[in-house]
Structure formats: C-alpha cells, structure tokens
Amino acid sequence: MAKKIFAKLYIALILVVLYAPIVFIAVFSFTEAKSLGNWTGFSFSLYKSLFTGGMQNSSGLISAVNNTLLIALVASAIATVLGTVAAIGIFNMKGRSKQAIQFLNNIPMINPDIITGVSLFLLFVFLHISQGYLTVILAHVTFCTPYVVLNVLPKLHQMNPNIYEAALDLGATPMQALRKVLVPVLRPGMISGFILSFTMSLDDFAVTFFTRGTIGLDTLSTFIYTDARKGGLTPELKPLMTIIFLIILVVLLAMNLKKTKNQNE
C-alpha cells in the first residue's frame, strides 16, 4: 500500500513540475499586466493585442510565427517523403549493411543540437551556400528525417511482406504498388513521423540559430532568444504560448480518441 501511495505521489510530483510552468503562463495570459506574476484583474487585452497587432514588436513576432510554421511544414513534408523511402530501403537491406545504416540513422537523434548546428553551418560556408530559408529548411530536414525512419520501420515489420510481391504479380508497376499497397499500410507511421518532425522543427533553436544567416530571418525560438537578451519578453508571448499548447493538446486528444475508437471496433 505504501509503495502504491509513494508511486502515485511521485507521478503527481512529476506532472506538477512538467505542467505547472505552462499553467502559470496560461493563467497570467488573462491579465493586463505586462510582467509575469503581477495579476491586475481578468482581461483579454493581451489576446486582443496579439491578434490586432497592437504590441510594440507586432510585425517581428507575427513574422517569426509565420516563418516557424512555413519552415516546419516544408521541412516535415520533405522529411516524411525521404524518411519513408529510406525506411523501405533499410527494411529491404540484409546483414551488417542494414545494421550499419540503422546505426548511422540514430546518430542525428542522439547528437547534441549545437554540434549539428555548427557542423551544418560549416558545411554551408564550405559549399558557399547563402544562408537563409534554404539552409534552415535543409538543416531541419537533416535532423527530422531519422525520426520519420524510426516511425515507419515498425509498420514495415508489421506488414505482410507478400502483399507487395502479390501486387507486382497481378500487373501493378512498382510505383503503383508503392502508392496503392505500401503507402496505405505505412500511413499511420508516416503521419506519426510528420507530426514528430513538425514538433521537432517547431521547437528547434540551436540548429536554426547557426544556419539562418544574417538576413534577419527569425523563427519563434530565435525571436524569443533575441527578445530575452533585450531585458524581457514581449507580453503577448504568454497568450501565444497558451494557444500553441491548447492546439497541441486538442490534436493529441483527438488522435488518442480515434485510436481508442479503432481498438474498440
């Protein structure tokens, strides 16, 4: 009994440590006070300022959000295609070569972001590639693709290996078999890989910081970093963080409800 109580208290403590800061920010996003922790009464003024552009750094923050979403969507889409093709290739490999490629695929996920960022920065400088949107997207594709491979491979192992060959025997071309047989089977893994890649790209700072160049390209993470160095954070970041958290929460709840529904059917 004591162990169960201790385990529950331990889990509760972890949840409090993880989510208390987010709840704290969400609560103080509904007050007019500019400084965090100063409650001056319930108000939607920060939300209104966020959506109407009434803040001092309005254009910079909105531009950073747009850049973040654009880069995350493009990089995640490319990584999903590359990762799926790579997973199929790895699945069909044999012996030590397969183990070696899987080992190499895991390195970018374990490698610290700052090392990846500096390495890609030096590579782009060596290749004389002008830094900007292109280099940031390429960098994000680089560290997102292994996560897609990791999500698609289990679906390949669960798949009946004969259905692809059967499609070819029935007259389908390799591309038709890929599109009509493999992709529907791999779709859950591809979706999971895309969502994970999108989240990783959305959250990244170190790689983006080293590969964005000096053209003034800001994502949300680099905007917050620059803003913090000026001596404080833009108050409208509180409602923005709250909205992002709620969107992610709704998406996760919808996915889990759909998964539970499918398991019960």
Image (cartoon, rainbow, N blue to C red):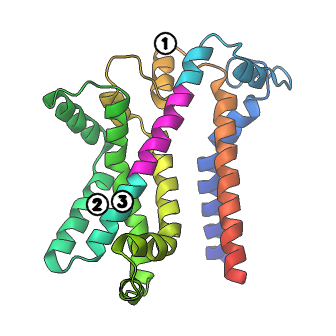
In the displayed structure, does residue 146 sit left or right of residue 231?
left
Is 66 a magenta residue?
A: yes
Q: Quadrant of the C terminus?
A: bottom right
Three-letter code, disc 2: Asn
In the displayed structure, does residue 161 sit left or right of residue 250?
left
In the displayed structure, does residue 134 sit left or right of residue 67?
left
Residue 230 disc label: 1
Residue 76 disc label: none
Is residue 3 visible in this depiction of the protein? Answer: yes
Q: Magenta: predominant secondary structure element?
A: helix
Is 257 a magenta residue?
A: no
Q: Is residue 194 above or below residue 259?
A: above
Mark 1 secondary-structure assignment: loop
Give the magenta-colored segment's residue range.
64-78
Position of residue 142 measured from the top left corner of the image (x, y, whole percent)? 31, 47
Residue depicted at 70% across the width and 41% down the height: 23
Position of residue 20 measured from the top left corner of the image (x, y, whole percent)? 66, 44
Q: How many marks?
A: 3
Residue corresponding to mark 2: 106
